[in-house]
Amino acid sequence: MSDGKAEKKSVAIIGGGPAGLTAAWELLKDGGADKYDVTVLEATREFGGISRTVKHNGNRMDIGGHRFFSKDDRIMDWWKNILPLQGAPSYDDKRLGRHHDLEPGGPDPEKTDKVMLKRHRVSRIFWNQHFLDYPISLSPSLFKALGFKLTMKAGFSYLWSMIHKLPEDNLENFYINRFGRQLYSMFFEGYTEKLWGRHPREISADWGAQRVKGLSVVAVLKNAIQKLMPKKRDSSEVETSLIEEFWYPKLGPGQLWETVESQVVDNGGKVLTDANVVELRQKDDGSIASVVYIDGNGQRVELAADQFISSMPVKDLVNAINKAAKDDDVPAQGVAAKPAAVPAEMVKVANGLPYRDFVTVGLLVKHLRLKNTTDTPTLGNPPIVPDCWIYVQDPGYKVGRIQIFNNWSPYLVKDVDDTVWIGLEYFCEEGDDFWNMTDEEATDLAIKELTRMRVINGPDEVLDSHREHVKKAYPAYFDTYTQMPELIDYLDSFGNLYCVGRNGQHRYNNQDHSMATAMEAVSNIKSGREDKKNVWSVNTEKSYHEEK
């Protein structure tokens, strides 16, 4: 006999990264466990995906660097509810007398780990042995680095680009229209090719539209002028790439996602690690019936559910659906005996979607050769440069970006006063020569590049090292990417399948965008909405990125 309670809906979530864990918590919070039976399937033993924190010999490494800032108030409030904002100075702020607006009643980062820090952002470009502001700012240091002749060329080139607009049918034209050909050739062309392994003219302009949108010479000028004005600007007025303060979990981004995972479990959700999804089986009506995963013991396990949220790479998702359709195993109850195989063209599109992988080499060093010539006080003896990131635009180096973890959070570094923990990011492809280097070879290359760049004095400065491979870090916008709209229509046809997150949508989302796709998917599940345009439209409309 019924007890009067509505039957729970079961939801299977593939992936324990930002999108997957956001979806799980959105379903379970505020008593949601009474309505939803939630299971998260994570292929590894770590949470956060590329937003995880790697621990090595007492030091912590942020994979890719994650600023916690969003123009979506839902996301900012969400983060703050997971890890409350600091109410007292952090170790470095206290030592250096740096000021942040502290949260009344907020936790003290010196006494508890469950806290979100407020951090100043400093990022610069290394170009032609000069360090320049990132994003490019029209500052005396830029003009000094360029010299009079190049400055004039850049200025006239930009004016020409304002008059003669190019068709934005590739990324090269997108950048030229906003910065002029001269600045594009110096600061965008080589770096973009280093990042993607393709020339910008081979890459869709969609990437630029999603990553830099309103950023241009005009935006840089406007930002510089407004900084001189006494009126405090609202964050909605500032292009994301120009944000100068951000939030950051005390122990790195992975700490936030580990906290979310714990809350999911504490509120009735199930989180399975070492659960590698290999098949998605269909019902007679064409909707998804179940997922099949390989567990930590190598056993195949089938999990049926009413709704499915996938943040696994689109390529793997399509192949998992296709594999199930061709599987000779006895189908589970309610599963179509002969489900339709994925159309050959859709398999071709999915398998042709490109990715860019990367390798991070962490180096613990005694000192940096670079001098802190800014007005920003820092720790270290001598004081280290204040950068979170240094972008290596110079094509003479393979490294694409350098992180200084001391500046993200002093709690990422075991001995933050006397050592510097840095991460060198190398863009590559899984299986290529760089990817297949030994740890020793990759570390040796990193040390040689830093020495040649005059960032460190030499190998004697290095105390420890760690290398981390990151697969499918960046969904790329070329090859079969142009056929993504057709693939989206096909995946949406399953009805009870939602694609979310960076790899789940094959879209270069920021962390907040990935979370927003999950929120939209959960909203649809709760409301019964069938149209999924809201899920796919996150980070495609210019207004989403630039306005509240």
Image (tube, rainbow, N blue to C red):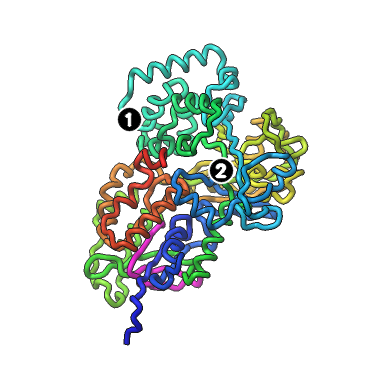
Residue identified by numbered label 1: 168
Residue identified by numbered label 2: 246
Q: Secondary structure at mark 1?
A: loop
Q: Residues within 10 Å of mark 2 (few under 14, many from 20)?
A: some
Sequence-wise, the earlier of marks 1 and 2 is: 1
**Of residues 186 and 135, which is closer to you in this image?**
135
The stretch in magenta equals 290-311
Q: Secondary structure at mark 2?
A: strand
Q: In screen coordinates, is 522 left or right of 528?
A: right
Q: Residue at x 61, y 25 (%)?
A: 130
Q: Residue at x 33, y 81 (%)?
A: 4
Where in the figure is residue 139, as x and y percent of width and height? 56, 22
Q: Residue at x 51, y 15 (%)?
A: 150
Of the residues shown, which amino acid type is indicated by label 2?
A: Phe
Q: Toward which corner of the image does residue 444 lie, by quadrant?
A: top right
The mark lying in front, picked from 1 and 2, is: 2
**Of residues 440 and 17, which is closer to you in this image?**
17
